[in-house]
Image (cartoon, rainbow, N blue to C red):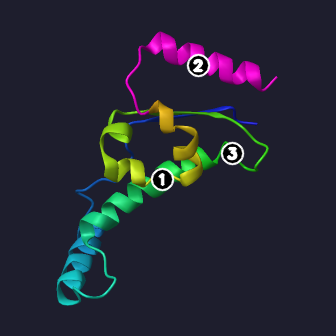
Amino acid sequence: MARCVVVAGLPYPDITDPELKEKMASMDASASIHRHNSSITGQAYYHNLCMRAVNQAVGRAIRSASDYAAILLLDSRYVTEDRIWSGLPHWLKRGAANQRQHLPFERRQEEMAAFFDSKK
């Protein structure tokens, strides 16, 4: 019954974590040896960890096709960086395609109120 999920920032893991650093170094070494292979770099893995956390958080509110919730991504990088935008689920991007513009907070409040009013 969650009706709103707020993701403040991008939940990147702690880059100084020794285990993560070792994993990323190992992936970088593997990717440099197997350039033609589907190996990903440590940086790509790090980014994927972040986007998986975002996708899991927003997915908590939407459990079925008939479910609904407001998803607030409170970081400008969600709309300004294509790599971040492309890591979001297709259903979310489809519903937020017109949201990739900067509008005053008051306007966003009105849009969210209208969204919930339409669900009554």
Q: CA distance from mark 2 to mark 1?
A: 26 Å
Q: Which amino acid does the dot numbered 1 rest on?
A: Ala
The kind of secondary structure the magenta stretch mainly shows is helix
> Which quadrant of the figure has residue 117?
top right
Number of the label disc, if any, that sits on residue 34 = none
> Circle 3 sits on which residue?
62
In the image, residue 62 sits, relative to residue 24, either above or below, namely above
Residue 16 percent coordinates (x, y): 22, 57
Q: Nearer the viewer, residue 59 or 92?
A: 92
- Is 61 on the left or on the right of 78, as rendered? right
Residue 62 percent coordinates (x, y): 68, 45
> Circle 2 sits on which residue?
111
Q: Which residues are magenta?
A: 100-120
Q: Quadrant of the N terminus?
A: top right
Q: Does residue 12 show up?
A: no
Q: Quadrant of the C terminus?
A: top right
Q: Which amino acid does the dot numbered 2 rest on?
A: Glu
Q: Secondary structure at mark 3?
A: loop
**Badge 1: few (under 14), some or many (20 or more) residues near its Cα, within 10 Å?**
some
Q: How many marks?
A: 3
2 or 1: mark nearer the eye: 2
Q: Return the disc, 2 or 1, that comes first in the chain's sequence.
A: 1
